Image (spheres, grey):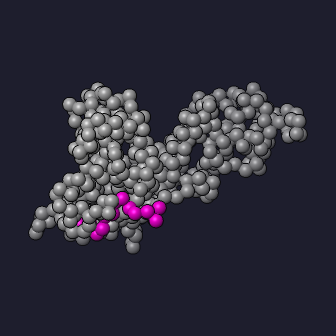
Amino acid sequence: MSTQQPVLRLQNLTRVHGSGATEVHALRGIDLDVFPGELVAVMGPSGSGKSTLLTIAGGLDTPTSGRVIVENTDITTADRKALAALRRRSIGYVFQDYNLIPALTAAENVALPRELDGTSARKARGEALAALQEMDLGHLADRFPDEMSGGQQQRVAIARALVGDRRLVLADEPTGALDSETGESVLALLRSRCDAGAAGVLVTHEPRFAAWADRVVFLRDGAVVDQTARSEADSLLSGQAAER
Amino acid sequence: MSAWAYSVYILSMSIRHGLLALLERGPRYGSQLRTEFESRTGSTWPLNVGQVYTTLSRLERDGMVTQDGEDEAGHALYSITDSGREELRSWFEKPVDRTSPARDELAIKLAMAVGAPGVDIRAVIQSQRHHTVKAMQDYTRLKVQALAALESGPSRERDDVAWLLVLEQLIFQTEAEARWLDHCESRLIRLSTAVGENRPAPTAAAPVQTVGPTPLH
């Protein structure tokens, strides 16, 4: 893993809201690398900075200082046009409330970022159908968002986030509006996309969903206080751990 | 009975009933029982063969199993008796007692950490949270594997289903612990903020650094 370039690099990231007496340090010097094939969960109490981290990583907000490097491009110094292109081509965003466009079918929703990026409508549709199929969502292609359950909409949103060559998916409480079983199916899809080579960052306050990640980063008061590393699960139940 | 003796007793009782449940499916010998017990529970609670034979001889003494000849390889076979079946049925019928809580080291540790000099209780909580979430990650990976095995398997094997249920219990337990730790932390912050407002020098729930009145859930 270490021989690969990270898809996302956050370097000494800070974000200050307001100034003077009302100054709030939302992020205080965050460093984080996310590699292809890796799902990283960011946990922390509300106000710890986890959503700020994600919006900055996605280029939806700018840091006060520090660098955000996506696929080798520093988005903090990129001009608006380059940033917009990068957001279309490299970054997929999944929100708590799905954010599919109600007037478009699942396939059209997934095709949209490719069309916006200049791909022909026909080719974009082909790519969208392929993406949906690959994620076992082919049967939903012609459904409109209001004809799908929340879990189905969220899985379509993940397909949209990763259509084409994009391989960075940023998910902000993607299971927040779902019951736990449906939430699990969304996590299973996110997990399998990362196993297939995507890089994912998942913001959640639910330990059960964070547990699907390879790494869990604990944020508190805008700083990383701790993180877990991946380990060999199979040794877990054969040693002393079993006697806990 | 002390809490410790009680928990040892509970564990041995569950082995006893586990063996009876396996024997109800037909006569078995000792190491076979051990293998089946472990494959049902994914070796979460490893048994040694000595424990199996000790338990079997107690069951025999109590008239719940009998030795019943040998198989071709010369292993002594055990069978369940009617009174063993009766005991097993009443085990399935009765809920597991939760009114005498087992001794929980973590609860005791946090109780002792409250106000302990030189102890940063938030660090204690975070170190446990790290460990607990890590265990959840491991259990979740095993669960993904177990689900994949069930989906690809030709039949929904009884042992695979049993193992999945045990794993999910471990996930629920660790989840409850992680949530409780979050709750403890926010509770302590809220209390220390309240104390700070009433008294300039807080002593309770000691060194909570870098804490402002941040809303926590």
Kindly tell me whether residue B110 is visible in this rendering. no
Q: Position of residue B28 (x, y in %)?
A: 78, 35
Read off the magenta span: A1-14
Quadrant of residue B34 in the image? top right
Q: Does the magenta stretch include residue A4?
A: yes
Q: Is residue B64 magenta?
A: no
Q: Position of residue A30 (x, y in %)?
A: 30, 66
Residue B52 sits above or below residue B109 on the image: above
In screen coordinates, is B1 left or right of A118? right
Q: Where is residue B44 in the image (x, y as percent from the top left)?
A: 61, 48
Q: Residue shown at 23%/66% (left/top)? A: A14
Q: Residue shown at 32%/56% (left/top)? A: A44
Q: How many marks?
A: 0
In screen coordinates, is A6 left or right of A244? left
Residue A117 sits above or below residue B106 on the image: above
Looking at the image, which is closer to me, A71 or A59? Answer: A71
Q: Residue shown at 55%/34% (left/top)? A: B151
**Quadrant location of the C terminus of chain A in the rendered image:** bottom right
